[in-house]
Amino acid sequence: MLVVETDMRDAAHFFALVVLVGCDSSDQAVNRVYPDMVVAPASVDFGDVAVDFTGAASIQVINAGLAALEIESATLSGADADAFSVTVEVPLSLAKDEVTSLGVVFTPLTYLPYAAELTIQSNDEEHPTLVIPLSGVGVYAPTPDIAVDPLSVEFAAVEVGATAFSTLGITNEGQATLTLTSAEQHGSGAFALIGANPSGFSIPPGQSQQLVWSYTPYVETGDNGTFVIQSNDPDEPELIVYLLGNGGGDFEYPEAVIDCNTPIRPRELVWLDGRASTDPDGLPLTYAWTLEGVPAGSGVEALTDPAQSLASFISDIAGEYAVGLVVTNSSGISSAKRQCKMEAIPEEEFHVELSWNTPNADMDLHVMWEDADFFSVPGDCTFCNQVPDWGVPLDTNDDPSLDIDATSGFGPENINIDRPVDGTYRVLVHYYDDHTDASVLATVRVYSYGVLVYEASQTMEYNYTWELGQVNWPEGTVGVTGVYRKNYEYDDNGDPVLMEDGVTKVSGPRNCSGG
């Protein structure tokens, strides 16, 4: 627990001190101002931290005075000082009312309590030295343990233009899930990873992930590169795998660098910037962007301007997008592929998406407020009632909005509410028109507060409805009902209602105007 405490001072220290001195024929007014260092919290307890892992805390330093505060040093002392570290460089200067953070990290090496002191020295005349007690306890916890075999992937005697393959195994020999936080390839573009980049992969204890590498040499002098794997293994957070082809070569390669936006939002133009890419000899570069992956249901099929240093695409739905970049110099030497994964996170608190798997069918998404009827106005937000006024009258923040209405094929459709009022919101899908398609697999994703809380799919036939359930607000939870049936009216016994001529009565109109 972090205890917040500030050192309150006499109000005079926050204002100029005016001293009037009589001098012969006139008075002189002398204004003197002071710096005033305030620190919060006054002590830091990291609590229990697993051995070999780290705990982090932030200490706020505020200049509450009128003169510049000069922080001269921030030093650690005590028997256990080696278990703590400070992540901000000093000295530093703070202007009036300026705030900075001193990062402190605790890394226990054994199962014991730890204590140390952080001493901050400054030009605050009243309190030039402040001491902040630090404490924490090293405890046992299961940890991941990465093992990579081989640490050097070697290809020998591969002819120019031919392709050879080799495998690399990543095993978790620990007792907790191993997460590969980053995996980047450097060096020659003659090496290529087959399949998805493993960045973000999770490997359970005792299991392995196999990677397949290809090597296609374009020169006879050999190639070299590295594959840098970063993970949550506490004692081996980074491993380097060496890639060697036909002896390895002895020259440097262009380096592809992606400056991409992450996270991103659905339905926005996303710029991909490769202008920081370099060549060791300063040769001109050409660019080759590729679209490596999109969320299921996305209609994004290609990038705009993939041969330029700046490329782009529009993130049509929420989920993960992945892109790759290879740069080639004017001598025909290519870089390793650099990849970037971007998560499109909805900005609205309430976000529902619908997509389907056929090219022609017209599927419609409905979100109904409380007990509203199918196709009712204003209670059913759908294609013919796209922005109804819900919640507080004339307040658009609590109103739903159908931002995309796809009338033929694949989708997506989505309905959003920036700040929903408390209550329940029923989510329903209607197979509105087949346009020669038959069965359709519909998929719905529900996001609450930017987090995917429910995803489900249903095979649907023409003029059937699928009611997933209801979203409960402000909890953001989903109560699943999964009712799938033809678009008829049903009596209390669940039987279809017949009209006078014996024809089954359709449930509600086909659109909001009664047509």
Image: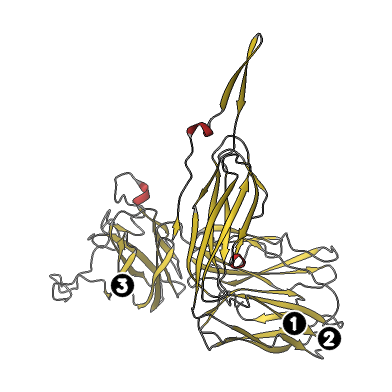
Q: Residue at x 58, y 22 (%)?
A: 19
Q: Is residue 492 above or below residue 134?
A: below
Circle number at residue 163: none
The answer to which image quadrant residue 250 occupies is bottom right
Q: Residue furthest top?
A: 25
Q: Which label sits on residue 247?
A: 2
Quarter holding residue 381: bottom left
Q: Is residue 379 above or below residue 333?
A: above
Q: Amino acid at mark 3?
A: Trp
Picture quarter with the N terminus? bottom left
Of all residues, the one furthest to the bottom in this rendering is: 157
Q: Residue, x 54% and y 85% (percent of image)?
A: 174
User: Badge 1 local density, few (<14 within 10 Å), some, or many (20+)?
Assistant: many
Which of disc 3 and disc 1 is earlier in sequence? 1
Residue 45 placement (x, y as % from top left): 48, 62
Tag count in the figure?
Answer: 3
Closer-to-camera residue (387/106) = 106
> Is there a contact, CB below 8 Å, between mark 1 and mark 3?
no
Looking at the rendered image, the quarter that the C terminus falls into is: bottom left
Label 2 SS: loop
Q: Mark 3 and 2 residues: CB-CB less than 8 Å, in contact?
A: no
In the rendered structure, find residue 466 and report the number of the disc placed on it: 3
Horizontal placement of 325 versus 450: left or right? right
> How far is mark 3 from mark 2, CA to CA?
61 Å
Q: Position of residue 257 (x, y in %)?
A: 70, 65
Q: Dot 1 corresponds to which residue?
A: 243
